[in-house]
């Protein structure tokens, strides 16, 4: 099972490898730089080599970047330009670090002119992909708060209109719950997977974010909670981890931690205990 967590890069990228090993994970998500600024990372070759060495030593794979929260690819002004520049730089760095790509919140549409800004979104995504290494992925994360990607139909339209195998999808359990997708009932979960496969194709599902929710079902609030402490039925996590169509995906937690210090071993251990041995 590929199960890991978002970890801090404080002290250098290789420190995130040490941290994920310390809590028992074998895959990883990191920021390339501050998630609340436009500053792009430019690590020295020595740091890149150290990260690659530690990654191979501890067999931490896959690794993903999570893009800055400032990104809005549906903007046709300065924010849109900065979003493209930041993602292009980050995905170029991903190629150097043997990181699979960048998981990104696509943004939101300005005003009420959705048709106009939808075309901006598609153009900007396409330009990012054209300017980045062919072995890297741009991974769109579903939304749970009325932003772009709140339902499978919208994600499907984006995937089809960009028409690139390098545009993939990250599903977040908290965001799905917030957007009104019932994960705790087997028939509902089966229906979700069937709908995803029909509209998008399960081969496009790259990674899961496994988070509980501090808010009720269909609340359109995406505040994360520790596994088993929120409003998502624990059976939902058992289903996601064990279903034949999802069990081989990487699972990344972004939980607050039981000590409020970030994703931790206790959350990972709870998920591991839910995994069937068969």
Image (cartoon, rainbow, N blue to C red):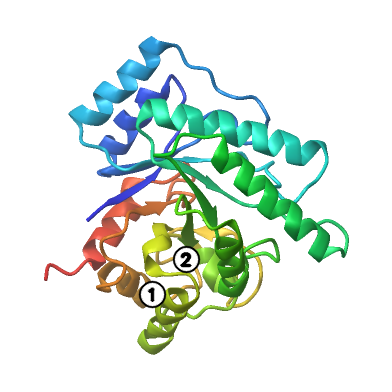
Q: Quadrant of residue 131?
A: top right
* Whether label 2 touches label 1, CB < 8 Å: yes
Using residue 74 as the reference point, say whether residue 252 is left or right of it. Answer: left
Provide residue 40's location: percent of width, then percent of height. 60, 25
Label 1 neighbourhood size at 10 Å, few (<14), some (14-19), many (20+)?
some
Q: The residue tagged with tag 2: helix, strand or loop? A: helix
Q: Residue at x 47, y 62 (%)?
A: 171
Q: Which mark is residue 173?
A: 2
Report if residue 214 is visible in the image.
no
Q: Quadrant of residue 242?
A: bottom left
Q: Residue at x 47, y 24 (%)?
A: 10
Q: Of 89 and 129, which appears nearest the observer?
A: 129
Q: Earlier in the sequence, mark 2 or mark 1?
A: 2
Instruction: State the residue position of label 1.
Output: 236
Q: Of 276 and 138, which appears nearest the observer?
A: 138
Provide residue 58's location: percent of width, then percent of height. 20, 32
Q: Residue at x 32, y 31 (%)?
A: 17
């Amino acid at each position: 099972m590929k199960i890991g967590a978002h970890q801090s890069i404080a002290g250098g990228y290789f420190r995130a490898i040490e941290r994920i090993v310390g809590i028992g994970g074998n895959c990883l998500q990191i920021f390339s730089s501050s998630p609340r600024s436009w500053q792009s990372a430019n690590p020295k070759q020595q740091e890149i080599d150290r990260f690659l060495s530690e990654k191979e030593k501890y067999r931490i794979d896959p690794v993903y970047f999570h893009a800055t929260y400032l990104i809005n690819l549906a903007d046709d002004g300065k924010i849109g330009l900065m979003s493209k520049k930041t993602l292009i730089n980050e995905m170029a760095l991903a190629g150097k670090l043997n990181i699979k790509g960048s998981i990104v919140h696509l943004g939101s549409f300005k005003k009420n002119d959705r048709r106009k800004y939808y075309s901006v979104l598609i153009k900007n995504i396409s330009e990012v992909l054209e300017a980045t290494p062919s072995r890297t992925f741009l991974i769109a994360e579903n939304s749970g708060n009325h932003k772009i990607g709140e339902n499978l139909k919208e994600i499907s339209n984006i995937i089809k209109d960009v028409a690139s195998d390098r545009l993939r999808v990250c599903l977040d359990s908290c965001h799905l719950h917030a957007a009104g997708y019932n994960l705790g009932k087997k028939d509902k979960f089966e229906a979700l997977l069937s709908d995803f496969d029909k509209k998008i194709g399960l081969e496009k599902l790259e990674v899961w974010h496994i988070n509980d929710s501090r808010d009720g079902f269909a609340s359109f609030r995406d505040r994360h909670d520790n596994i088993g402490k929120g409003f998502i039925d624990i059976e939902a996590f058992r289903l996601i981890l064990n279903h034949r169509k999802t069990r081989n995906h990487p699972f990344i937690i972004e939980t607050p931690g039981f000590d409020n210090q970030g994703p931790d071993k206790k959350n990972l251990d709870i998920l591991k205990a839910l995994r069937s041995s068969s």
